[in-house]
Image (tube, grey):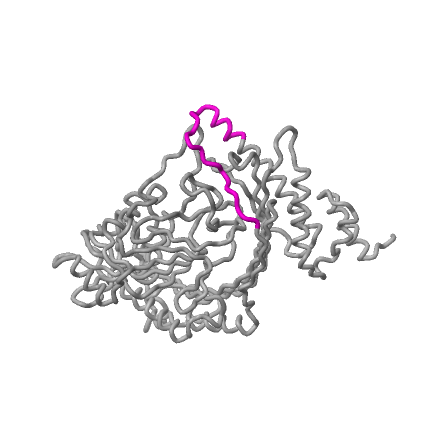
Amino acid sequence: MKTIPLARALAVLAVTFALDAGLTPADALAAPAGAAEVVDDGAVKKAMEDEMARSLAQLKLGSEAPPYFLRYVVVDSDRSWVSARLGALVDEERQPSRALHIEVRVGSPDEDNTNFIGSSPGGSATVTREDDYGVLRRDLWQLTDREYKQALEAIARKKASRAVQAAEKDKVPDFSKAPVVNTVTSKATAPTAADLAKLKELTLKLSAVFREFPKVDSGRVSGGTEASRRRLLTSEKTWTDERKTRVRVDVLADTIADDGQHLSSSMAFTASDVASLPPLEKMEADVRALAKNLTAQRTAPQVEAGVASVVFEGQAAGQIARLLLAAPLSGQPIPRAPGERMATDGSSSFADKLGLVVAPKWLGVVDDPTALGPNKRVLGGGYDTDDEGVPSERVTLIDKGVVKTLLMSRAPRKEIPKSNGHGRGAANIRAAAANLFVTATGGLGQKELLAAATRSAGPKGAVYIVRQLSESSGIGRGQTIQARVAVRYKDGKEEPVRGLSLEGFAPKKLKKDLVAAGRELFVVEEYSQSIVTPALLFEDVDVGRPNDKNRTPPLYPSPLAAGAAR
C-alpha cells in the first residue's frame, strides 16, 4: 500500500474543501494547510473578504434578486471559569470558541426581508477555532446560502401580506444608510496564569463565607474571565476589529423559610480585569451581608398589602432604571404583522413621546458607549462601533424630563431616520442601551432620601428599601415585579421583610410617582449593558405578597448547623 506524505494529504484535503466552497485549488494551496499548527491572523479577514465578494457576484436563485447587503461577523471568545461551594472547588474549565453571524438582506433598503413578524435577517453557527482559510470560507458559504434562501421566503411573505392591505402613508424604509468605517481597537487585558490563580482563590474564599451561615441552604460562587474579539465586515466595505476583556464574580444563595417560601439573593462583582476587582475584604463583607440578610428573611414577617413609598437602591436601582428607561427608550420598530401593522403599547415605550414630558424636570438620561463610569471605571457595555459596524454616539435621551430622541439601530423610524450607533445583538440586531447614565439634579444624601420617603408615606404609610429585584421581573401595563432583597424602614431602623410585590410599574410611573433621587451612584452590569444611576424614590406604590405556592422545607437541619452532625 502506497503511503501519502502528511503535508501532501493535508494539501489534498484543503483542495477538497476549496472545491466544496467554489475556490480554486491554487487558492486552497496558498492557505495554511496545517491550521492546527499554523496561526495566520490575516486568514480570517481574507476569508471573509473573498467569500463575501464571491457571494455578491454569484449568489442568485433563478429570477430572484441577489442580496443587496451582507454582514459577516466572526466572534472569538476565550472563557475561563471556576465555581465553588463552602470553600470547596466544584468546577473549573476553559472554553475557547468561535461563532459566525451572518446577515442577508434582499430587496432594497426601502423594502426588504426584515421588519416583518417571524422574519429574521440573519443566522449564527459555531465554527472552527483555527485560522483555516479554506474551512472558514466553506462555513461562510454554507451559512450565507442558508440565510439567503430564508430571506427570499421572508420577503415573499411580506409582499403577499402587503398585497391585501391598504397602502401606508409616509412609509418608512427598512434600512438606513451608515458611514463606511475601518477601525481596529483593543481594550483587552488578557488574563495571565497568575490572574486565573488569584480569581480561583477569590472564588474559594468567598464561597467559604457561607460556612458561617448554616441556615442558608445553598451558597454558590463562580468566577470567570472572558477575552473576546469581534471582526465585522459588510458589503459596504465597513471593517471593524474590536477586542475587550471582562471579569465577573457571581454569588447566588437561596434558602427556604419555615413556611416553605423560597428565598434567594445574588450579587455580582465585575471589572475589566482581575486586578480591578474590589479588595477581597470588601467582597467578603458584601457576601457576608447578603447571607446575613437571607438568614434574617427566613423568620421575617410577610408584607401586608397596601400603599407605600419605595426607595430602589444598589442593584435594584439599576434594574428599575433598565425596566423603566433603557427598554422604553429603544427606537426599534415593532415588526409588522400579516395584513396589518402591529399595535403598539404606549405604556411600555417612549416611541410616541418624543418632545413630551415623561419624568420629573430634574431627571436626565444619557447613553454613551465610550464613557467611563464613576472613578474612571471601565464599563462592560461599552464599545467603539456597534454590532452593525456603526460608530457609537453619545446620545441625550431625556433632558429635564423631556424625551429628546431614542436609541437607534439601522432600522429607521419616521422621526429618526438614521442609526446613532446602538444596534446590539449577534445575527438579529435591536436598538438597545450600552452605558446608560441616569442623572438627578439636586440629588439627596441617603438620610435625606429616607426622610423624604417617610414624609411621602405619611404617618400611617410604609417605607420600603428595595436592594434587588427578581431576575424574572418584566414590564408592561400594570406589571407586578418581585423584590428579592428588601427591608422596611421604620423609626430610623431597617427591618427585614419577605414576599414584597410591587404592582403597577410601567414607564408612565416615572412622571406620576417618581419624587426624588439619591446622590450616590450605583453601577449595575447585566445583559451586556451598564446602568449608572442614583437611588430612586417612588411614592404611592401598591404593594402585596406573591401568590407562588410554597415548597416543603427540609425535614431536618443542615449538617453544618450546630449539633446537627451528631
Q: Quadrant of residue 523?
A: bottom left
Residue lying furthest bottom: 281
Q: Is residue 510 left or right of residue 375?
A: left
Q: Is residue 340 left or right of residue 80?
A: left
Q: Is residue 257 visible?
A: no
Q: Compared with residue 549, is residue 242 higher up or lower down, i.e. above or below?
A: below
Q: Nearer the viewer, residue 302 or 453?
A: 453
Q: Compared with residue 193, is residue 9 higher up or lower down, i.e. above or below?
A: above
Which residues lie in the magenta part? 156-180
Residue 2 lies, in percent from the top left, at 87, 53
Chief secondary structure of the magenta span?
loop
Residue lying furthest top: 164
Residue 437 sits inside the magenta stretch: no
Q: Compared with residue 335, is residue 287 higher up or lower down, i.e. above or below?
A: below
Residue 37 lies, in percent from the top left, at 72, 61
Q: Residue at x 34, y 58 (%)?
A: 438
In the picture, which quadrant includes the C terminus?
Answer: bottom left
Q: Is residue 224 left or right of residue 6?
A: left
